[in-house]
Amino acid sequence: MRFQGKISEWNDARGFGFVQPHGGGERCFVHIRAFSARDRRPALGDVITYDVQTDAQGRRNATAVRFALARDGARPGARAAARGAGQDRLPRTAIALVFLAGITAVAMWQRWPSWVPGIYLALSVLTFAWYWHDKSAAQHDRQRTPETTLQSLALLGGWPGALMAQAMLRHKNRKASFQQVFWATVAINLVALGWLIHDGSLLG
């Protein structure tokens, strides 16, 4: 039998709490690892559905836990449909590949030092790896990578790799505050590159 209830206690630091079933009855222990989806962390007052298992000590534990309602009060299916309607159509991977190919070609034609495209490529690989690590940490409830680290890597020249990670891993591509800072770092990096080209520093 599947139950529905509300999280009545939650310790986010330790990742567990208790759920009180609708209609009354004995509450159940619930751990963050019991949630089927890890797209967001549970919070006090969340409505969930769950199965119940009794351990060797007779304690009731919630298993196969799912969110019954999204944070905005909508059902998960409706929220997913809304996400699909507003799908990210920015060609992030194409932008990254065109830039990397373009700067490599220009460097060859203009006889720039090979380290110029090399730095962008190396930092892009490193940035993609950090995005993958942060995505994995979010899904498995491990320590996250600070956003300042991801943004700093983008600022230094790893933004093509960040774009590819956002597109391929679907990570950080919908958080508005993150995206605002991210595109600012891209603009600053390109302005700095343009200044170096105009100043002649890359040819010296």
Image (cartoon, rainbow, N blue to C red):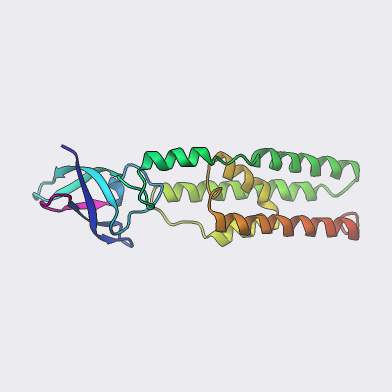
Q: Quadrant of residue 36?
A: top left
Query: Which quarter of the image is occupied by the C terminus?
Result: bottom right
Q: Which residue is depicted at the point 63% across and 56% down?
A: 182
Left/right of residue 129 with respect to residue 30 in the rendered view = right
Residue nearer the viewer, 74 or 130: 74
Q: Which region of the structure is painted magenta?
A: 22-31
Residue at (73% x, 56% y) in the render: 187
Q: In which quarter of the image is residue 88?
A: top right
Question: Residue 40: x percent and y percent?
Answer: 39, 51
Quick one: which residue is furthest to the left in this view?
A: 58
Q: Is residue 81 above or below residue 27?
A: above
Q: Quadrant of the N terminus?
A: top left
At a point 85% along the width and 58% down the height, the residue shown is 196
Q: Nearer the viewer, residue 87 or 43?
A: 87
Residue 68 image offset from top left, x and y in percent: 30, 45
Labels in figure, total: 0
Q: Is residue 158 left or right of residue 140?
A: right
Taken as a whole, is the magenta stretch helix, strand or loop?
loop
Please say whether residue 23 is one of the residues in the magenta stretch: yes
Q: Residue at x 54, y 41 (%)?
A: 86
Residue 66 in the image: state x and y as whole percent. Answer: 30, 43
Q: Does the magenta stretch include residue 148?
A: no
Residue 179's x, y, as percent?
A: 60, 54
